[in-house]
């Protein structure tokens, strides 16, 4: 793992911890995890369909736009 990837992972973990403590404070972690699970289970199925569609579109865009450009750059003369 290169140093940039390690740094990015540390930033993501730090941001997740800060957002968790900002939202829930230093309460009982099990209770807040159950609250989060309850909220996720209470969402309408349409929310999951929209999120799944967005992930699918992002993946297709990655396949159609990024990978051909990367292949064209790496293919030498």
Image (cartoon, rainbow, N blue to C red):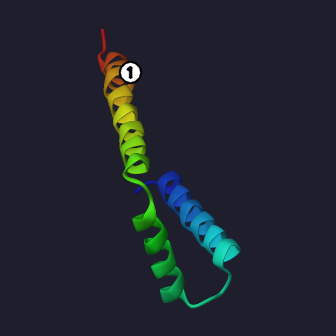
The picture quadrant where one finds residue 68 is top left
Residue positioned 57% across, 91% down in the render: 28
Instruction: Give the camera-side residue of 8 and 77.
Output: 8
Residue positioned 33% across, 29% down in the render: 60
The picture quadrant where one finds residue 23 is bottom right
Instruction: Give the camera-side residue of 7 and 22.
Output: 22
Instruction: Give the camera-side residue of 73 and 23.
Output: 23
Instruction: Give the camera-side residue of 26 and 51.
Output: 51
Q: Position of residue 47 (x, y in %)?
A: 44, 49
Q: Quadrant of the C terminus?
A: top left
Q: Is residue 14 above or below residue 2?
A: below
In this view, which residue lies farthest toward the bottom? 28
Residue positioned 43% across, 73% down in the render: 37
Residue positioned 66% across, 70% down in the render: 18
- Left or right: 4 as drawn, with respect to 61: right
Residue at numbered disc 1? 65
Q: Position of residue 36 (x, y in %)?
A: 49, 72
**Other-residue count near label 1 (Cα within 10 Å), few / some / many at <14 / 14–19 / ≥20:** few
């Amino acid at each position: 793992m290169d140093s940039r990837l390690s740094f990015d992972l540390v930033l993501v973990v730090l941001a997740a911890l800060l957002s968790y403590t900002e939202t829930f404070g230093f309460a009982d972690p099990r209770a807040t995890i159950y609250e989060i699970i309850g909220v996720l289970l209470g969402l309408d199925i349409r929310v999951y369909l929209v999120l799944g569609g967005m992930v699918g579109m992002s993946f297709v865009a990655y396949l159609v736009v990024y990978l051909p450009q990367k292949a064209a750059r790496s293919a030498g003369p």
